[in-house]
Every structure is written in structure tokens, then in C-alpha cells.
Image (cartoon, coloured by chain):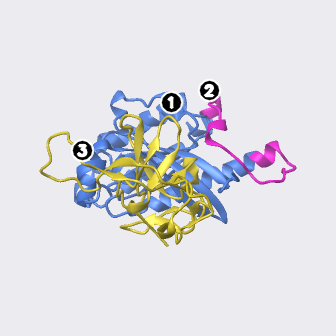
Chain colours: A blue, B yellow
Amino acid sequence: MAKTYDYLFKLLLIGDSGVGKTSILFRFSEDAFNISFISTIGIDFKIRTIDLDGKKVKLQIWDTAGQERFRTITTAYYRGSMGIMLVYDVTNEKSFENIKNWIRNIEENASADVEKMILGNKCDLDSKRQVSKERGEQLAIEYQIKFVETSAKDSLNVEYAFFTLARDIKAKMEKKQEASNPAPRTGGHQLRANEQQRKPTSWLSRCSLL
Amino acid sequence: MSEVVNKDTVPDEAQKDYVEDGKNKLLVKCKFCGSKILEKKTAKYVAIEKELPLMQQDANRKDGEVQKEMINEYFHVENMYIFENIGFTHPVDNYKYLICADCDAGPVGYYELDSKHSYVALSRIVQS
């Protein structure tokens, strides 16, 4: 069967327990059908199809909830992932401080060129805020990663965040393809998540981000 | 025409409206929010009998009990990336249940871990 899409990107949601990763992926709406059956099993991943500048892009988005208590995410989760959302809770200082640890974990386990983005979630809870937007922005500048505050509860900036991350992955891929393959093949792009190989991260290759 | 009709592949009169060349003639959408689950003609109609947990479980059911119903019409999706928008639950035995990617209503079908094939229950979605 012919491919029905142009790109397929595997994305991960990572961050401390309780920052709202699952809510970003899973709405846990108040309806009875969710409370009774689906929410007790929990969600593994979602597939979403978006249009990015005329290209049909499939996003496979994985929740890592339940894994984070091990302080690290196992290599299996990182395998083939092309984009990572680093999520903290703006009402939880510790979860913000831990973003640096998560970035280290990614550098040790994920592909060296994985795209990253930082999300400051729960920005609707302004009265409980412990981390200012400016500190979030500052951290993002330090690591040269994009940043946005989100509210999964109000669906604020969540879609924007996924589009931004997907667009950055696509741009990086097209650039890489041009570099390695100046004369483009006919038949279009066919990229699979599992073709991306994990590359060991050397300290030197990351120094631009340190 | 032979008197023996292959129930697995030949849709009866009632199904002709939404099955064409053995596939879903129309878009498959979520019953509750209208989220697009499958594009036209991407899944195969199959008449198989398979139990699915009810979308609404009785609050007074026994602890650990899962209420189910028999469903006998499904759209068979060979590759998960054929889906436009869909969610997968954590595995239960040999299955992951399929849910709407937008409102999380489900199960709208199941995914078989062994075969990696998915089945969407016709009675749990709408077509247009």
C-alpha cells in the first residue's frame, strides 16, 4: 500500500511526575466513559496527523508517565525519538530545577540531534506560581531550546508547541537530506522513526549547548 | 451467484451504503467530538465477532469486573500509521484499546499486539 503521509515523527513527553505530561496527551475529561474504563488502563501513545506547510505529517506522541520515578527514562523509550517535550510545572520549583537533569538524561541516552522544547505547564494556576516566565525563558536561552508556557487544562499553547517542535524536526531533516543528498531522489521523502540511529553523545559535540 | 455467501468479505444490503470495494466508503469519525479517525477507503470491512468493553461501565459493577458486549462488524487497519488521529491505551493481555485522540472516548476498537493490526468497531464510530 502506498504511503499516506510524508513524514512520521516520534515524540516524547518527559519531566517530573505530576507536571501534567499525561494531561497534555490525555484529557481525562469528566465524562463517565473515561473515568470508568479508559483512565484506569492509562494511555500509551497517540497518533495525530497534521499539515505542515503542505506536507502530511504523522506524529506519534508517547507519554512517559510512570517511568519518571526511576529518575531516568530507559533507552527503549528514547530509541527512534526525534523530538522531546521537556515539561515542568510552573507551580513546582523542583520540577523546574530538574529540567537540567532531564536534559542530561537525554544527552546520555537519546539521539544526539533530537529536537527539544521546554514547556512550563499549568500556567493557568497563576496564584500558585513558583517559577516566573522569565526564568523559563532564561533556561531555554541557556540551552538554546525553544520555550513556551502551556495550560493543558485550558488547551493553551499545547497545539502550538507540537506544531513548533514538528516544524523544527522537519526543517532539520530537510537540511540534513540536502547536505547528504544534494540531488534529491524522485519519489519523495520516506522517513521512518526507527531508521534514526542513536549516536553516542560526546561532550565536545554538545559544547555549543553547554 | 452462489448460495453460499462469504460473510467475511461480502457486505449485505445494509452495509452497502458505507462499504465500497470492501473498504470504508466514508470518513470514519468520533461519535462524540467528530475527530477524524480514518480517511476514506483506508480500512477493510470485516465481519468478525469480538467482545469489547463497554464505553460506559456501570458504577455499581463488581470490583475488577469489566462489562463487555459482542460486536460483529469492524474496520480492519493493517498499519497503525494509516490512522489520522487515534490513541492507544496501555496493553491489557494481548490488546491495546483504541480511543479517540481528541476526546479520549473509547474503546472504539482494539489493537492486537501479536499481529500489530487494529480493528475499529463500526457501532462505536460515525461515518460521513
The chain carrying label 3 is: B
Seen at 58% across and 43% down, the residue is A82
Q: Which residue is mark 2?
A: A200
What span is in magenta?
A177-206
Q: How many neighbours does mark 1 have within 10 angstroms: few (below 14), some (14-19), or many (20 or more)?
A: few
CB of mark 1 within 8 Å of CB of mark 3? no
Q: Which residue is mark 1?
A: A76
The chain carrying label 2 is: A
Image quadrant of residue B42? bottom right
Is disc 1 on the same chain as disc 2?
Answer: yes
The prevailing secondary structure element of the residues shown in magenta is: loop
Q: Which residue is mark 3?
A: B66
Is disc 3 on the same chain as disc 2?
Answer: no
Image coords of residue A23 (percent x, y): 34, 52
Comparing B57 with A141, the one in front is: B57
Q: CA distance from mark 2 to mark 1?
A: 15 Å
